């Protein structure tokens, strides 16, 4: 069977069955590996991007550098961690210019310093296609760690920020709308490190992950780990102003983007009902919206309610190796 | 200027000038990043390989998996560290088969378990060319850390094991010599983790690195960091039996391979003269040869003595983006 038939998540299952279990407290399948380290976990996240399969041609080298750092820091954020540093492996074709390399590293450096951390090492190799692998590591107290597993029926489902920024950036590229601010939503995402730390310190979250592959995909991933279901209230989903801006100009289905498009890097959280207010207040302090969009159910379906009708929510988020709807 | 003119080491200088200095105690340019962690350093090493530029077509997926783990563990070994774990990012074309993926992961898993560690996480992505990035992390007490910087004039230069195993494997491929044991020297290298730990515990090494890019290249890299020179005694260099085996069958210059060919992953060490015996004995205990091959000099030249003549040793080791002699 080819990976194109298997899909990314089945491929990860194949890998997981082969690996010997070692010191990782949280195994493959969570946003980060978490290694037992006295009173803390050492968090490690790794992500690879390559030009032909992940980078729109409009993406500047500065943005590529920013992006690879941001998506790795997002995984540290989703576990409640503080970042310790990042290493970057750069696979570059030999005809790449020195100025391209400089811009790439300026972007990577800008993102690390913006979030109070640094690039501490790396590797440069010659490859056919630009391929960049970042590995971020961070630290979190054990009792503040926010795992993927832990969602309980009755818990609320909530998200930081709003959805559709990356989708709006995708539309801007598709419809040739030259708006740098809208493009940034796709090409220069913001890892929710401050939000992750603040939620972790409150110790009120039952499960957490980042929404890198889209909301529907993320819900199905949480469902799979937690053996629960979700009922999402479509009207409660906060839609990014950038996506509404696109909707004013083009005939698009904003919910298709808000529900299924990847790249927003918001945190998807489950939280006991009686703790929701504390989370909202904690996020208010740092100027970030935190919105309940549904609840965890005993029934294992992932459903969406809109206009008084409940439907199954399809799992249409991004998955590598497979064909996609966007 | 293109990277093909700049070369890997100048590219790293360009990168290094852009990055803000952060928490890394040992910056870019050493085998690992070393992060201050109470009484210890957290060591992090990252390495990327891609099929078209690094993997001979004879390399099996099992060997690719073994290789990416081994070269990362080798960097941890060179700093005296014990490994904590490894993450792997797999960039794979979508027409790769499930059995290829399984073999790759079996090789990676075999190498980690052989050296008492484990793969704790990773990422799978779709790429055009097979590209794999491993990141190993380890731990070492601060007073046992073996840096690249520290070589003093008068110190001895020594290496673990012998040189030319990888060169012999390269020759076996070139001359179609079907000998799996010889090929393994190139395709399934052994990271010197036990040797690195044993030397570190003795606290006798003034500088250390692994010889991944070949002896001459490694000496020039140490020269650059330490502002010293080296005088190598060609007759003292232990040549791998596999390379001598090839020499019996084919007209090859064994010293070209022993001095310049990369991929042996032995440890290159500088050590005060009066500590050499202790190092030899410590290595004897674990069954590894440890051979003095020269000395550190005040003069900044890298020279080689053979048949009573002293010559400059050329820097002909492997460097990415540039053309090579092999």
Image (cartoon, coloured by chain):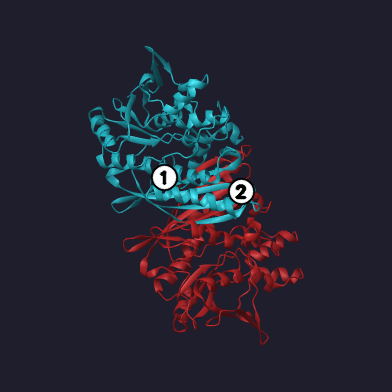
Chain colours: A cyan, B red
Q: Is residue B276 above or below residue B66?
A: below
Image position, residue A304 (x, y; %): 40, 19
**Residue position marked by numbered label 1 in the rendering:** A73
Of A60 and B8, the residue lying toward us: A60
Which residue is pictured at 28% across the width and 43% down the height?
A: A144
Give the percent coordinates (x, y) of residue B68: 55, 54
Q: Is residue B43 left or right of residue B67?
A: left
Name the element at disc 2: helix
Q: Answer with left or right where residue A39 lies relative to residue A233.
A: left
Position of the N terminus of chain A by quadrant: top right
**Residue B170: x, y in percent?**
68, 62
Q: Is residue B23 above or below residue B291?
A: above
- Is residue A21 something one can see in this rendering? no
Closer-to-camera residue (A256/A223)? A256
| Residue displayed at 22% across by 28% down | A274
Residue under disc 1 on the same chain as residue under disc 2: no
Nearer to us in this view, B107 or B255: B255
Q: Is residue B108 left or right of residue A299?
A: right
- Residue A124 in percent (x, y) is at 56, 56
State the SS at label 1: helix
Q: Is residue B95 above or below residue B80?
A: above
The C terminus of chain A lies in quadrant:
top right
Q: Residue furthest bottom?
A: B308
Tell me the subunit letter for badge 1. Answer: A
- Residue B247: name its quadrant: bottom right
Q: Judge by depth and name the residue closer to the eye, A92 or A8.
A: A92
Q: Can the viewer see residue B298?
A: yes
C-alpha distance separating marks 1 and 2: 31 Å
Residue B61 numbered mark, or none: 2
Query: Which residue is pictured at 45% across the width and 62% down the height?
Result: B27
Residue found at x 56% / y 31%: A173
């Amino acid at each position: 069977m080819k990976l194109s038939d298997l899909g990314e998540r089945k491929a990860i299952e194949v890998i997981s069955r082969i690996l010997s279990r070692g010191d990782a407290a949280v195994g493959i399948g969570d946003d980060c590996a978490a290694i037992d380290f006295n009173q803390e976990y050492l968090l490690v996240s790794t992500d690879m991007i390559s030009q032909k399969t992940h980078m729109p041609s409009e993406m500047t080298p500065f943005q590529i550098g920013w992006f690879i750092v941001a998506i790795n820091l997002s995984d540290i954020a989703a576990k409640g961690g503080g970042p310790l540093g990042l290493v970057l492996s750069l696979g570059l074709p030999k005809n790449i210019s020195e100025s391209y390399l400089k811009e790439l590293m300026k972007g990577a450096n800008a993102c690390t310093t913006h979030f109070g951390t640094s690039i501490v090492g790396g590797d440069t190799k010659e490859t056919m296609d630009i391929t960049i692998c970042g590995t971020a590591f961070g630290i979190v107290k054990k009792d503040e760690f926010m795992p993927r597993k832990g969602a309980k029926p009755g818990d609320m489902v909530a998200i930081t920020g709003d959805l559709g920024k990356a989708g709006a950036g995708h539309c801007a590229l598709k419809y040739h709308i030259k708006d740098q601010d809208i493009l940034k939503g796709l090409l220069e995402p913001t890892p929710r490190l401050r939000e992750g730390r603040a939620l972790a310190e409150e110790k009120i979250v039952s499960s957490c992950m980042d929404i890198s592959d889209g909301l529907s995909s993320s819900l199905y991933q949480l469902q799979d780990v937690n053996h629960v279901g979700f009922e999402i209230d479509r009207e409660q989903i906060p839609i990014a102003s950038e996506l509404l801006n696109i909707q004013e100009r083009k005939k698009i289905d904003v919910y298709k983007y808000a529900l299924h498009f990847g790249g927003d890097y918001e945190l998807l959280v489950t939280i006991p009902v009686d703790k929701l207010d504390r989370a909202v207040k904690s996020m208010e302090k740092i100027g970030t919206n935190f919105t309940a969009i549904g609840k965890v159910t005993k029934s294992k379906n992932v459903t969406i309610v809109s206009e008084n009708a409940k439907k199954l929510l399809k799992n249409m988020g991004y998955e590598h190796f497979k064909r996609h709807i966007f």
